[in-house]
Image: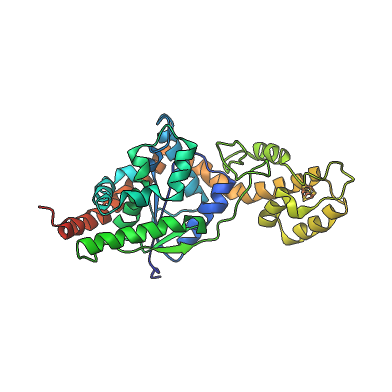
Protein backbone atom coordinates (compact mmCIF):
# COMPACT_ATOMS: atom_id res chain seq x y z
CA UNK A 1 0.00 0.00 0.00
CA UNK A 2 1.39 3.41 -0.84
CA UNK A 3 1.79 5.71 2.13
CA UNK A 4 0.40 9.21 2.54
CA UNK A 5 3.71 10.77 3.42
CA UNK A 6 6.50 10.77 5.97
CA UNK A 7 5.90 11.42 9.63
CA UNK A 8 8.62 12.36 12.09
CA UNK A 9 8.37 12.27 15.84
CA UNK A 10 10.97 12.37 18.56
CA UNK A 11 10.83 11.59 22.26
CA UNK A 12 13.39 12.00 25.01
CA UNK A 13 14.82 8.80 26.45
CA UNK A 14 12.82 8.61 29.66
CA UNK A 15 13.23 4.90 30.32
CA UNK A 16 10.32 2.59 31.00
CA UNK A 17 7.17 4.14 29.63
CA UNK A 18 3.99 4.75 31.57
CA UNK A 19 0.31 4.93 30.77
CA UNK A 20 0.59 8.66 30.03
CA UNK A 21 3.30 8.01 27.44
CA UNK A 22 1.23 5.20 25.97
CA UNK A 23 -2.02 7.13 25.63
CA UNK A 24 -0.30 10.39 24.70
CA UNK A 25 2.18 9.15 22.10
CA UNK A 26 2.95 5.46 21.63
CA UNK A 27 -0.60 4.40 20.75
CA UNK A 28 -0.63 7.06 18.06
CA UNK A 29 2.85 6.07 16.83
CA UNK A 30 1.62 2.52 16.31
CA UNK A 31 -1.55 3.61 14.48
CA UNK A 32 0.27 6.04 12.17
CA UNK A 33 2.32 3.21 10.73
CA UNK A 34 -0.70 1.97 8.78
CA UNK A 35 -0.88 5.14 6.70
CA UNK A 36 2.49 6.85 6.86
CA UNK A 37 6.15 6.12 6.50
CA UNK A 38 7.24 6.76 10.07
CA UNK A 39 10.53 8.01 11.45
CA UNK A 40 10.69 7.67 15.23
CA UNK A 41 13.68 9.09 17.00
CA UNK A 42 14.91 8.83 20.57
CA UNK A 43 16.28 12.32 21.04
CA UNK A 44 19.23 11.80 23.36
CA UNK A 45 20.94 15.07 22.37
CA UNK A 46 17.82 17.02 23.35
CA UNK A 47 17.95 15.32 26.72
CA UNK A 48 21.41 16.81 27.33
CA UNK A 49 19.93 20.31 27.46
CA UNK A 50 18.37 19.62 30.84
CA UNK A 51 19.73 16.42 32.43
CA UNK A 52 22.14 16.62 35.36
CA UNK A 53 23.83 13.33 34.61
CA UNK A 54 24.08 10.98 31.65
CA UNK A 55 24.48 7.96 33.90
CA UNK A 56 21.10 6.42 32.93
CA UNK A 57 20.96 7.62 29.34
CA UNK A 58 21.89 4.28 27.73
CA UNK A 59 19.61 2.19 29.91
CA UNK A 60 16.73 4.65 29.53
CA UNK A 61 17.15 4.58 25.76
CA UNK A 62 17.09 0.79 25.73
CA UNK A 63 14.02 0.54 27.98
CA UNK A 64 12.11 3.07 25.94
CA UNK A 65 12.94 1.37 22.64
CA UNK A 66 11.91 -1.97 24.14
CA UNK A 67 8.55 -0.52 25.20
CA UNK A 68 7.98 0.97 21.76
CA UNK A 69 8.66 -2.34 20.06
CA UNK A 70 6.56 -4.30 22.54
CA UNK A 71 3.69 -1.84 21.99
CA UNK A 72 3.66 -2.53 18.25
CA UNK A 73 6.12 -0.27 16.47
CA UNK A 74 7.24 -2.28 13.48
CA UNK A 75 10.93 -1.67 12.80
CA UNK A 76 10.84 -3.46 9.46
CA UNK A 77 8.57 -0.65 8.24
CA UNK A 78 9.32 2.31 10.49
CA UNK A 79 12.72 3.84 11.09
CA UNK A 80 13.48 3.70 14.80
CA UNK A 81 16.79 5.19 15.87
CA UNK A 82 18.82 7.29 18.29
CA UNK A 83 19.28 10.96 17.39
CA UNK A 84 23.04 11.09 18.09
CA UNK A 85 23.65 8.14 15.76
CA UNK A 86 22.98 10.47 12.84
CA UNK A 87 25.59 13.22 13.22
CA UNK A 88 24.25 15.13 10.21
CA UNK A 89 21.52 16.51 12.47
CA UNK A 90 24.05 18.65 14.32
CA UNK A 91 25.42 19.99 11.04
CA UNK A 92 21.95 20.98 9.84
CA UNK A 93 21.27 22.46 13.28
CA UNK A 94 24.22 24.80 13.00
CA UNK A 95 23.32 25.86 9.46
CA UNK A 96 19.72 26.56 10.48
CA UNK A 97 20.91 28.51 13.50
CA UNK A 98 22.42 31.09 11.12
CA UNK A 99 18.96 31.99 9.81
CA UNK A 100 17.33 32.08 13.26
CA UNK A 101 17.03 35.40 15.11
CA UNK A 102 18.01 34.94 18.73
CA UNK A 103 15.05 36.98 20.01
CA UNK A 104 12.64 34.57 18.39
CA UNK A 105 14.10 31.72 20.45
CA UNK A 106 14.13 33.56 23.74
CA UNK A 107 10.52 34.69 23.17
CA UNK A 108 9.18 31.13 22.94
CA UNK A 109 6.94 30.29 25.92
CA UNK A 110 8.62 26.90 26.41
CA UNK A 111 12.03 28.54 26.70
CA UNK A 112 10.73 30.99 29.31
CA UNK A 113 9.19 28.09 31.20
CA UNK A 114 12.47 26.13 31.18
CA UNK A 115 14.36 29.18 32.46
CA UNK A 116 11.82 29.56 35.22
CA UNK A 117 12.17 25.88 36.18
CA UNK A 118 15.93 25.82 36.12
CA UNK A 119 17.44 29.32 36.21
CA UNK A 120 20.93 27.98 36.96
CA UNK A 121 21.22 25.93 33.80
CA UNK A 122 20.28 28.20 30.91
CA UNK A 123 22.76 26.82 28.42
CA UNK A 124 23.34 27.63 24.77
CA UNK A 125 21.87 24.27 23.71
CA UNK A 126 18.67 24.98 25.60
CA UNK A 127 18.16 28.24 23.73
CA UNK A 128 18.73 26.49 20.41
CA UNK A 129 16.50 23.52 21.24
CA UNK A 130 13.78 24.44 18.71
CA UNK A 131 16.42 24.80 15.99
CA UNK A 132 17.66 21.27 16.69
CA UNK A 133 14.06 20.11 16.61
CA UNK A 134 13.63 21.78 13.22
CA UNK A 135 16.79 20.04 12.02
CA UNK A 136 15.37 16.69 13.19
CA UNK A 137 12.27 17.17 11.10
CA UNK A 138 13.85 18.80 8.05
CA UNK A 139 16.75 16.33 7.80
CA UNK A 140 14.37 13.46 7.09
CA UNK A 141 12.16 15.59 4.83
CA UNK A 142 9.16 14.72 6.97
CA UNK A 143 6.00 16.38 5.75
CA UNK A 144 3.94 15.77 8.89
CA UNK A 145 4.63 16.02 12.58
CA UNK A 146 2.04 14.58 14.94
CA UNK A 147 1.75 16.87 17.95
CA UNK A 148 -0.79 18.07 20.44
CA UNK A 149 -2.18 21.56 20.00
CA UNK A 150 0.10 22.88 22.77
CA UNK A 151 3.08 22.13 20.52
CA UNK A 152 1.71 24.25 17.66
CA UNK A 153 4.16 27.15 18.29
CA UNK A 154 7.10 24.77 17.84
CA UNK A 155 5.85 23.50 14.52
CA UNK A 156 5.16 27.05 13.40
CA UNK A 157 8.72 27.89 14.42
CA UNK A 158 10.03 24.95 12.37
CA UNK A 159 8.02 26.05 9.34
CA UNK A 160 9.30 29.62 9.59
CA UNK A 161 12.88 28.45 10.02
CA UNK A 162 12.65 26.22 6.97
CA UNK A 163 11.12 29.12 5.02
CA UNK A 164 13.92 31.46 6.14
CA UNK A 165 16.54 28.93 5.07
CA UNK A 166 14.96 28.30 1.68
CA UNK A 167 14.54 32.05 1.11
CA UNK A 168 18.04 32.96 2.21
CA UNK A 169 19.63 30.41 -0.11
CA UNK A 170 17.00 30.65 -2.84
CA UNK A 171 16.26 26.95 -2.71
CA UNK A 172 13.42 24.52 -2.09
CA UNK A 173 15.62 21.87 -0.62
CA UNK A 174 13.96 21.74 2.80
CA UNK A 175 10.31 20.87 3.22
CA UNK A 176 7.99 22.95 5.42
CA UNK A 177 6.46 20.40 7.78
CA UNK A 178 2.74 20.33 8.40
CA UNK A 179 1.40 19.96 11.88
CA UNK A 180 -0.66 16.82 12.17
CA UNK A 181 -2.88 17.94 15.01
CA UNK A 182 -3.36 15.02 17.30
CA UNK A 183 -5.74 14.80 20.19
CA UNK A 184 -3.48 14.07 23.11
CA UNK A 185 -5.47 13.15 26.20
CA UNK A 186 -4.31 14.66 29.44
CA UNK A 187 -3.59 11.59 31.52
CA UNK A 188 -3.55 12.32 35.22
CA UNK A 189 -1.35 10.45 37.63
CA UNK A 190 -2.56 8.29 40.50
CA UNK A 191 -2.77 11.46 42.61
CA UNK A 192 -5.68 12.50 40.37
CA UNK A 193 -4.27 16.04 40.29
CA UNK A 194 -1.20 16.34 38.11
CA UNK A 195 -0.22 15.02 34.71
CA UNK A 196 1.17 11.49 34.93
CA UNK A 197 4.92 11.74 35.18
CA UNK A 198 7.83 9.68 36.35
CA UNK A 199 9.42 12.60 38.17
CA UNK A 200 6.25 13.08 40.24
CA UNK A 201 6.14 9.34 40.96
CA UNK A 202 2.43 9.28 40.17
CA UNK A 203 2.77 6.97 37.17
CA UNK A 204 1.78 3.43 36.22
CA UNK A 205 4.50 1.70 34.21
CA UNK A 206 3.47 -0.37 31.24
CA UNK A 207 6.09 -2.96 32.10
CA UNK A 208 5.10 -3.33 35.75
CA UNK A 209 3.84 -6.75 36.83
CA UNK A 210 0.08 -7.25 37.23
CA UNK A 211 0.58 -7.20 41.03
CA UNK A 212 2.55 -3.94 40.96
CA UNK A 213 -0.04 -2.41 38.63
CA UNK A 214 -2.90 -3.40 40.91
CA UNK A 215 -1.07 -2.00 43.92
CA UNK A 216 -0.61 1.38 42.17
CA UNK A 217 -4.24 1.45 41.10
CA UNK A 218 -5.41 0.77 44.64
CA UNK A 219 -3.53 3.95 45.66
CA UNK A 220 -5.41 6.09 43.12
CA UNK A 221 -7.19 9.15 44.43
CA UNK A 222 -10.91 9.06 43.60
CA UNK A 223 -13.73 11.58 43.99
CA UNK A 224 -12.37 13.57 46.96
CA UNK A 225 -15.90 14.26 48.24
CA UNK A 226 -16.60 10.55 48.62
CA UNK A 227 -15.33 9.81 52.10
CA UNK A 228 -17.39 6.80 53.20
CA UNK A 229 -18.50 3.78 51.22
CA UNK A 230 -22.10 4.89 51.72
CA UNK A 231 -21.48 8.36 50.22
CA UNK A 232 -22.68 8.69 46.64
CA UNK A 233 -19.75 9.51 44.30
CA UNK A 234 -19.32 11.59 41.19
CA UNK A 235 -17.52 9.71 38.40
CA UNK A 236 -17.20 12.92 36.39
CA UNK A 237 -14.48 14.16 38.76
CA UNK A 238 -12.83 10.78 39.33
CA UNK A 239 -9.64 9.76 37.55
CA UNK A 240 -10.39 6.06 38.04
CA UNK A 241 -13.55 6.56 36.01
CA UNK A 242 -11.61 8.39 33.26
CA UNK A 243 -9.38 5.33 33.02
CA UNK A 244 -12.35 2.96 32.99
CA UNK A 245 -13.66 4.85 29.98
CA UNK A 246 -10.46 4.01 28.12
CA UNK A 247 -9.80 0.45 29.24
CA UNK A 248 -13.09 -1.10 30.38
CA UNK A 249 -15.96 -2.55 28.34
CA UNK A 250 -18.84 -0.15 27.65
CA UNK A 251 -21.38 -2.01 29.75
CA UNK A 252 -19.08 -1.92 32.78
CA UNK A 253 -18.44 1.80 32.30
CA UNK A 254 -22.20 2.42 32.09
CA UNK A 255 -22.80 0.36 35.23
CA UNK A 256 -20.15 2.28 37.22
CA UNK A 257 -21.53 5.58 35.98
CA UNK A 258 -24.90 4.70 37.52
CA UNK A 259 -23.83 2.73 40.60
CA UNK A 260 -21.17 5.18 41.78
CA UNK A 261 -23.74 7.98 41.90
CA UNK A 262 -26.01 5.99 44.22
CA UNK A 263 -23.23 4.38 46.28
CA UNK A 264 -24.06 1.01 44.71
CA UNK A 265 -20.38 0.33 44.07
CA UNK A 266 -17.46 1.14 46.36
CA UNK A 267 -14.16 2.63 45.23
CA UNK A 268 -12.19 -0.47 46.22
CA UNK A 269 -14.33 -2.68 44.02
CA UNK A 270 -14.26 -0.09 41.24
CA UNK A 271 -10.45 0.07 41.31
CA UNK A 272 -10.16 -3.72 41.35
CA UNK A 273 -12.26 -3.84 38.21
CA UNK A 274 -10.08 -1.24 36.54
CA UNK A 275 -6.94 -3.14 37.56
CA UNK A 276 -8.31 -6.36 36.08
CA UNK A 277 -9.22 -4.63 32.81
CA UNK A 278 -5.93 -2.80 32.51
CA UNK A 279 -3.91 -5.92 33.26
CA UNK A 280 -5.86 -7.80 30.62
CA UNK A 281 -5.24 -4.99 28.14
CA UNK A 282 -1.50 -5.05 28.87
CA UNK A 283 -1.13 -8.84 28.69
CA UNK A 284 -0.01 -8.98 25.02
CA UNK A 285 2.32 -6.03 25.59
CA UNK A 286 3.98 -7.71 28.56
CA UNK A 287 4.35 -11.02 26.74
CA UNK A 288 5.97 -9.31 23.79
CA UNK A 289 8.21 -7.23 26.04
CA UNK A 290 9.44 -10.37 27.79
CA UNK A 291 10.05 -12.07 24.45
CA UNK A 292 12.00 -9.17 22.92
CA UNK A 293 13.75 -8.34 26.19
CA UNK A 294 15.07 -11.89 26.43
CA UNK A 295 17.49 -10.85 23.71
CA UNK A 296 18.60 -7.27 24.47
CA UNK A 297 20.91 -7.30 21.43
CA UNK A 298 17.85 -7.49 19.20
CA UNK A 299 16.71 -4.07 20.48
CA UNK A 300 20.13 -2.58 19.82
CA UNK A 301 20.12 -4.21 16.36
CA UNK A 302 16.84 -2.44 15.57
CA UNK A 303 18.35 0.90 16.63
CA UNK A 304 21.55 0.26 14.65
CA UNK A 305 19.62 -0.66 11.54
CA UNK A 306 17.28 2.33 12.02
CA UNK A 307 20.26 4.70 12.29
CA UNK A 308 21.73 3.24 9.11
CA UNK A 309 18.51 3.89 7.20
CA UNK A 310 18.18 7.35 8.77
CA UNK A 311 21.78 8.22 7.81
CA UNK A 312 21.08 7.34 4.19
CA UNK A 313 18.25 9.89 4.05
CA UNK A 314 20.29 12.41 6.07
CA UNK A 315 23.37 12.13 3.86
CA UNK A 316 21.33 12.89 0.76
CA UNK A 317 19.59 15.87 2.39
CA UNK A 318 22.89 17.30 3.59
CA UNK A 319 24.45 16.95 0.15
CA UNK A 320 21.60 19.08 -1.23
CA UNK A 321 21.81 21.50 1.70
CA UNK A 322 25.56 22.07 1.31
CA UNK A 323 25.10 22.69 -2.36
CA UNK A 324 22.24 25.14 -1.66
CA UNK A 325 24.35 27.04 0.88
CA UNK A 326 27.23 26.97 -1.63
CA UNK A 327 29.72 25.72 0.90
CA UNK A 328 33.10 25.36 -0.80
S1 LIG B 1 -16.79 4.25 42.57
FE1 LIG B 1 -15.27 4.39 40.98
S2 LIG B 1 -15.89 6.12 39.74
FE2 LIG B 1 -16.96 6.29 41.71
S3 LIG B 1 -15.63 7.59 42.95
FE3 LIG B 1 -15.11 5.47 43.41
S4 LIG B 1 -13.43 4.98 42.03
FE4 LIG B 1 -14.40 6.83 41.27
Tell me where residue 312 sits by quadrant. Answer: bottom left
Q: Position of residue 167 (x, y in %)?
A: 24, 64
- Please tell me which residue lies in front, 317 or 111: 111
Name which residue lies at 36% across and 37% down. 123
Name which residue lies at 50% across and 43% down. 291
Q: Position of residue 297 (x, y in %)?
A: 39, 39
Query: Does 28 sit left or right of 141 as displayed?
Result: right
Name which residue lies at 27% across and 52% down. 96
Query: Does 199 sit left or right of 98 as displayed?
Result: right
Q: Please determine whether, in this image, residue 127 is positioned above or below residue 309.
A: above
Q: Position of residue 281 (x, y in %)?
A: 63, 51
- Please tell me which residue lies in front, 18 or 123: 123
Q: Position of residue 134 (x, y in %)?
A: 34, 54
Q: Please determine whether, in this image, residue 161 is positioned above or below residue 304.
A: below
Q: Is residue 256 visible?
A: yes
Name which residue lies at 55% across and 50% down. 22
Which coloring applies here?
Answer: rainbow
Q: Is residue 295 visible?
A: no
| Residue situated furthest right in the rendering | 230
The N terminus, quarter of image: bottom left
Count of marks placed on residues: 0
Query: Does 111 sit left or right of 262 as displayed?
Result: left
Amino acid sequence: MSKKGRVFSGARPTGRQHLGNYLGAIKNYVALQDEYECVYCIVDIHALTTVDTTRDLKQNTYEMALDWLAAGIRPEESIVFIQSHVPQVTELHILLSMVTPLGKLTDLPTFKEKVRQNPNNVNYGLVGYPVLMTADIALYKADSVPVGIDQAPHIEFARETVRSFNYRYNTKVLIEPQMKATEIPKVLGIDGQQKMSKSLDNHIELAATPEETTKRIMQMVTDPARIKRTDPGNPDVCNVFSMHKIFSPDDEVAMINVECRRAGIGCVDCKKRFAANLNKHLEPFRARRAEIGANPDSVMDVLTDGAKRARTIAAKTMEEVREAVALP
